[in-house]
């Protein structure tokens, strides 16, 4: 019995397509997970305010309502994060301790360190 060449080619093409589909199906979730992880990592980095040498950095930050900001104290000295109208207020943060607050409403939030009031920062949520 003889199989025409054209039919063999068709079978080979179908096999290649199946393999491509299987690879795509296997890799899809992996790529999706990597993209999601990258997005989360990028978001985290953007929403961290460090305290270094008696300075909030970045000093001013504009974020979308719903964003969580995390302050991390890198000084050897304790600091706090206190909003002027006491919308939020951290406990005393020792070295490498952090405080997080989620901005659930729009507004301009001026804050300072309760222990060193010359240390100031601002968050604008909109
Ligand atoms: Cu301080």
Image (cartoon, rainbow, N blue to C red):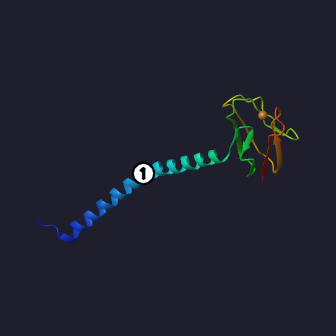
Q: From this viewpoint, which residue is outermost toward the right?
A: 85
Please name whichever residue, 63 or 94, is drawn nearer the observer in this view of the structure.
Answer: 94
Q: Is residue 88 left or right of residue 22?
A: right
- Locate residue 25, reporting x and y percent: 42, 53
> How many marks are shown on the rendered structure?
1
Q: Is residue 61 left or right of residue 44?
A: right
The residue tagged 1 is 27
Identity of the residue drawn at 71% across and 43% down? 68
Tell me the crowding category of disc 1: few under 14, some 14 to 19, or many 20 or more residues within 10 angstroms, Cα based: few
The image quadrant of residue 20 is bottom left
- Locate residue 57, reporting x and y percent: 71, 45
Examine the rendered structure and indicate whether residue 24 appears above or below residue 6.
Answer: above
Quadrant of image for the C terminus: bottom right
Identity of the residue drawn at 74% across and 29% down? 78
Element at label 1: helix
Q: From this viewpoint, which residue is outermost toward the front?
A: 53
Identity of the residue drawn at 86% across and 38% down? 86
Identity of the residue drawn at 16% across and 67% down? 3
Quadrant of image for the N terminus: bottom left
- Locate residue 55, reporting x and y percent: 74, 41
């Amino acid at each position: 019995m003889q199989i025409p060449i054209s039919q063999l080619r068709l079978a080979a093409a179908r096999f290649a397509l199946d393999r491509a589909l299987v690879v795509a199906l296997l890799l899809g979730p992996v790529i999706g997970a990597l993209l999601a992880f990258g997005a989360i990592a990028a978001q985290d980095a953007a929403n961290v305010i460090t305290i270094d040498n008696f300075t909030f950095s970045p000093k001013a930050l504009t974020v979308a309502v719903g964003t969580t900001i995390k302050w991390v104290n890198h000084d050897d000295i304790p600091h706090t994060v206190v909003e002027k109208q006491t919308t939020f207020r951290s406990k005393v943060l020792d070295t490498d301790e952090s405080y997080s607050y989620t901005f659930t409403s729009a507004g301009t939030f001026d804050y300072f360190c309760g222990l060193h009031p010359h240390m100031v920062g601002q968050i604008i949520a909109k």
